[in-house]
Image (cartoon, rainbow, N blue to C red):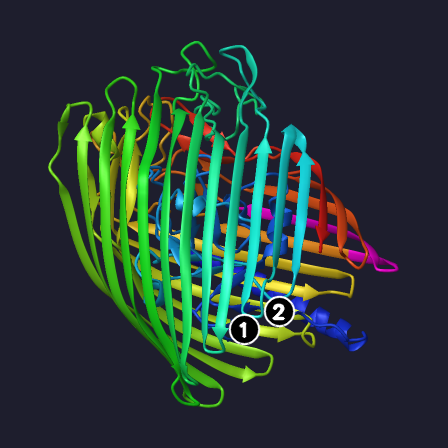
Amino acid sequence: MKKTWFTNSARLVAGCSMIALTAGAHAQSSDNDFVLEEIVVTAQKREQSLQDVPISVSALGGEKLKDFAAGGEDIRLLSSRIPGLNAESSNGRVAPRFYIRGLGNTDFDLAASQPVSIVVDDVVLENVILKSFPLFDIDRVEVLRGPQGTLFGRNTPAGIVKFDTRKPTQEAEGYVNASYGTYGTASLEAAYGAGISDKVAVRVSGLLSRRNDWIDNGFSGKEDEMGGYVEAAMRAQVLIEPTDTFSALLNYHYRSLDGTSEIFRANIFDAGSNELNGNFDRDTVYHDDTHRNEQSYNSWGTSAKLEWDVSESMTLTSVSAYETTSGCGIGDIDGGNTGGPGVVPFPSTTEDCIDNLDQFTQELRVSGQGTDKLFYQFGFFYFDSDFTIRTRPFFVPDSTVRHQNQTWALFGQLSYDLTENTTLTVGGRYTDDEKTADAYSGAFGSALPTVELNGDNFSWDVALNHIINDDLSVYARVATGFRAPTIQGRDVAFFGVPTTAKEETITSYEAGFKSDLVDGRMRWNGAIFYYEMDDLQVTAVGGGTNNVRLLNLNEVKGYGFETDLEFLVTENLSLTAGASYAHTKIYDGSVRVPICGTGMCTPTDRLDNQGRAIINGNPLPQAPDWTFNLVADYVRPTGDGEEFFMSADWAYQGDTNLLLYTTEEFYTDGTFELGLRVGYRWADNQYELAFFGRNITDEKNVKGVIDFNNLTGFVNEPRVFGLAFRADF
């Protein structure tokens, strides 16, 4: 396996090198009056050029997000479109699960802990419902790969997906973006910002998106019974700058979602095959549940970012934030009925609700240029969360689990220029974390003893960045991180008790390069990595009773690489490409997990004498070995400020095991999606009219499975064609 990986890596590097050399030769005979724009990121909580950050970072502009989201997709649209990133959800448009370099968590509970953190406008969104806030009026997405424990804290051992929204400015500007397509998929996004005085600027933005119900229910005989949604979100920001040394950015945001949760489809595999069989019909299911897989959630939040320039060399930053959400989702878990296609031994429907989540965060940070060679930042962070998960199995009374979590941390980072071309960055963070869970079992009609977990950890990182010349730099980084201890209380609703997992820790090694080639027309960055994870927290789900149990795996190792390439081929054609490889392996000979409850699947793992799978040596679930992405943008000016344009994108995901154990059925290989956008711009790009297509070949890609009752799975979004109009003002 390692030999194959190094061979494939060498081939990819050689191929990219050939592209660079060919492009360089082309540049010698071309007019070189255009270059790539500099990408500024805040991966280290300060503005830096992407090329100067000693971390594997990919950045994606907000305009490209609009192209990807044209067919009604949610935050999961990022999956495989950034090297090393996977995303999926068994809860529809809420509760996304992210994976970076193969590290993630398949737990579907609304209280699940994840090793990939979502940060929006400097605010961490911890709960899985908060992580699904719609994408609109986004300036930039940054994906930080590898542990980010020093500056961003616990629950970041895999990395961070960081969103920065567009902020208020004194300049009056805005836009309207509207689209309509297949299944009545429609969206209206708008934003406007301006200065209302020389010291105050505002920006208001919003999104309204919807889709008609389009999936027939063969059991009830009703057409277009589910599959639709209506989602609304808004954001209001006020920037106050009373003096040259103080600013306050105030933010309020709101989200409402009503529609269909994930659609589970019974018996869409034949035993011994991972191919979709004749039972699969994208437009029809056979659900005997009368709740129509409905979900409804409401969220809002507010934040205040205050910045004081205490002196020319010191800035004090305070970020205070509050988030809240409530809502419920119902799922026909077996995906069918006893009279429908295949076997459904018994009906299974569950409703999960999150009641009155309250999350408060506070960060105080001091940063500045200590000397010409030294940049410093240090600070304090506090997190408090309180929410209740209510589960209704329908055959017994509701159960509830109240989760409370308090965390505080002290952190600091120093960057020192050892020489004119070499910078050393070191950082550390001490974190104290406390969790409690108070459960009431409807099955037993009684309260269970309080579960308490305490954990503390010191995370650190060291990075060395060296500038070889104006066009090339190399770096090396060693970093540690951890995920705090976790409580899983879902089994309380099914005659069980909460399970726990102790903290997981990671040590990661990374080396990479960042280059600007072809006289600034090409940007090529890459990194290789190796990590060792101790006590990885995983969730074992399945067996005849579909128990949900937290486990710690003794050790997991992973290695691989990722690379990004952006190239202005001509003044009219640009290419963006990315690739990643991740090999993950479990090292734990003692763990056993239940397999498919009905015995319908075909395990390829060794089984113990109780029929449970021995997962030692398996890859991690939802960890693609390869991902590739490619975007080609072509523009042809037609004169007088008008132009024709075309954009095509492709995202590929390689072999991916879907569960902790391996079978002939529950894995995917070679899945991809294609997108296309063709249109016309006029009035100096002020207006745009475009035809778009998402998943234009209508690929039926399995995204996840449910194994306890039959061979159930769920798939990607359908093909959507439509028209979009945009106006800037």
Left or right of residue 207, residue 254 in this image:
left
Q: Is residue 593 visible?
A: no
Depth check, front residue: 99 or 252: 252
Magenta region: which residues? 635-654
Position of 51 relative to 136 (above/below): below
Q: Which residue is mark 1?
A: 51
Q: From mark 2 to mark 1, how far is it between C-alphas?
A: 9 Å
**Contact, CB < 8 Å: mark 2 with mark 1?**
yes
Q: Residue furthest left?
A: 449
Residue 484 spot, x, y in % from top left = 25, 54
Q: Quadrant of residue 684?
A: bottom right
Image depth: mark 2 or mark 1 in front:
1
Q: Main secondary structure of the magenta part?
A: strand
Residue type pointed to by label 2: Arg
The disc placed on residue 140 is none
Depth check, front residue: 638 or 475: 638
Query: The N terminus is located in which quarter?
Result: bottom left
Q: Residue at x 61, y 52 (%)?
A: 191
Q: Residue furthest front?
A: 197
Residue 721 spot, x, y in % from top left = 69, 36
